[in-house]
Amino acid sequence: MGYWGGLDVGELLLAHELFHYVEEKHKKEIYTRTEKIRLWSLGPLHNDSTIIALSEIAAMAFARELVKLPYAPYVMDVFLVYGYSPEEASGLYEEMMELAGRTPCAPEERKDVE
Ligand SMILES: [Zn+2]
């Protein structure tokens, strides 16, 4: 399991997947599965969908509690996205930093750490 700057990535991801396991066992009553949005309706026909993002947000919040992370584990999303699009990952990182009121910077701009 990868240990990265005080974070055991394997442990975090395991905790995340543990939530999905519990969620699957309780899919009939757990909010992340019962909450639906209507994609479209036409007369008596309609198409409802679960909100995947809800499930992912809950899984990360659960993992954060379980491994007692002092920061939001959503930053992990940047690395997961990086695998298929470095550009999108970079945009996501900048958006997260701006929403958190921080200044995004590239690694080479950081003179304080080596
Ligand atoms: Zn997930």
Image: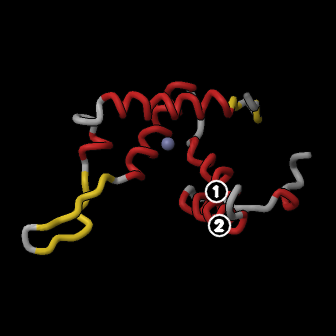
Q: Would you name the residue on which mark 1 appears?
A: 81
Is disc 2 placed on a helix, strand or loop? helix
Q: Name the residue furthest left.
A: 44
- Three-letter code, disc 1: Val
Please name the residue shown 53% across and 29% down the image.
15
Q: Residue 108: percent from the left, percent from the top?
A: 88, 60
Q: Is residue 111 above or below residue 76?
A: below
- Crowdedness near tag 1: few (<14), some (14–19) or many (≥20) residues, C-alpha within 10 Å: some
Q: Nearer the viewer, residue 103 or 42?
A: 42
Q: Are marks 2 and 1 in contact (CB under 8 Å)?
A: yes
Residue drawn 63% across the image and 27% down it: 11
Query: From the viewer's perspective, is residue 48 above or below residue 42?
Result: above
Q: Is residue 53 above or below residue 99?
A: above
Residue sitting farthest toward the bottom: 42
Residue at 29 percent of width and 36 percent of height: 27
Q: Nearer the viewer, residue 18 or 69?
A: 18
Mark closest to the chain's N terminus, 2 or 1: 1
Quick one: 42 or 86, which is closer to the camera? 42
- The residue sitting at the front extreme is 45
User: Cα distance, mark 2 to mark 1?
Assistant: 7 Å
Which labelled disc corresponds to residue 88?
Answer: 2
Quadrant of image for the N terminus: top right
| Label 2, residues with CA under 10 Å away: few <14, some 14-19, many ≥20 | some
Q: Horizontal and vertical percent for residue 8? A: 69, 29
Q: Position of residue 52 (x, y in %)?
A: 40, 51
**Location of residue 31 with respect to 87 vertically, above or below:** above
Q: Which mark is residue 27?
A: none
- In the picture provided, is 14 more to the left or to the right than 55? right
For the residue labelled by badge 1, is the local secondary structure a helix, a strand or a loop?
A: helix
Residue type at mark 2 is Glu
